[in-house]
Amino acid sequence: MVAARVGVLALQGDVREHVSALTACGVLPVEVKRPADLEGLDGIVLPGGESTTMGKLLRIFELLAPLRELIGSGLPAYGTCAGMILLASEVVDGRHDQELLGGLDITVRRNAFGSQVHSFEGPVEVAGVGSVHGVFIRAPWVERAGSSVEVLASVGEHPVAVRQGHLLATSFHPELTGDERMHDYFVTRVVS
Ligand code: GLN
């Protein structure tokens, strides 16, 4: 069987860590830097970083429109942190001109858990995955989730892991922990 090709948006952020996690899951990671890199992908990971910068870079590198279209027509995508923001249909406390890819029927609050000093780590119980070590870095939370969005994990009353069909998003960064179960969930249950 040919390994699935899973892209990692490689404009900014912790690309290498996602590439390693995907490799460990047995798929072929593809760094996506320009539109041609999107060809033949079975899924894509949108890493953490800075969502406003990533939005600008997506436009500059002419990836915004094709990626919006692919995600809108069913390309499986997994967004972590800033990647969750990119997948959201709406953002609170974003920049007024912030570009989103959209697709996921959620409203996210950017920097919801506070500034750098309020970044934290702790166990998070994720439905279908188990307890994972959640690393939250100026992380968003989900403020509103549409009726077709499944909440997989919450911190307090705030969802931090959600899925809507082919789209998966977490506020936290599993790629920084050496635990591949979230990527494995994406590869085996969302991409397949
Ligand atoms: N606060 C960042 C943003 O708004 C996200 C931080 C992260 O990805 N770790 O994009």
Image (cartoon, rainbow, N blue to C red):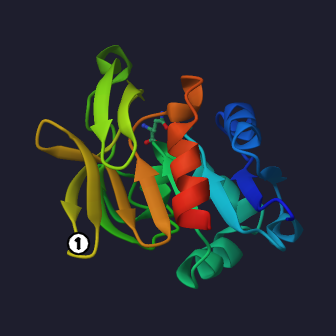
Q: Residue 77: name its quadrant.
A: bottom right
- Residue 54 versus residue 89 in the image, above or below: above
**Image location (x, y in percent) of residue 32:** 79, 56
* Residue of label 1: 146
SS class, disc 1: loop
Instruction: Report the number of numbered marks.
Output: 1
In the displayed orientation, state which residue is furthest to the front.
1
Horizontal arrangement in the rendering, residue 41 relative to residue 179 (left or right): right
Question: Where 4 sits versus 28, above or below?
Answer: below
Which quadrant holds the N terminus? bottom right
Residues packed near mark 1 inside 10 Å, few (<14), some (14 to 19) or many (20 plus): few
- Apparent side of residue 95 relative to residue 149 in the rendered image (left or right): right
Residue at the spot x=50%, y=71% of the render? 166
Residue sitting at 29 percent across and 49 percent down? Answer: 93
Q: Which residue shows up at 74% across the image and 39% down it?
A: 19
Q: Quadrant of the C terminus?
A: bottom right
Q: Residue furthest top?
A: 117
Q: Amino acid at mark 1?
A: Gly
x, y percentage for residue 72? 54, 81
Residue most extreme to the bottom: 73
Residue occupying image coordinates x 27% and y 28% = 114
Q: Is residue 161 visible?
A: yes
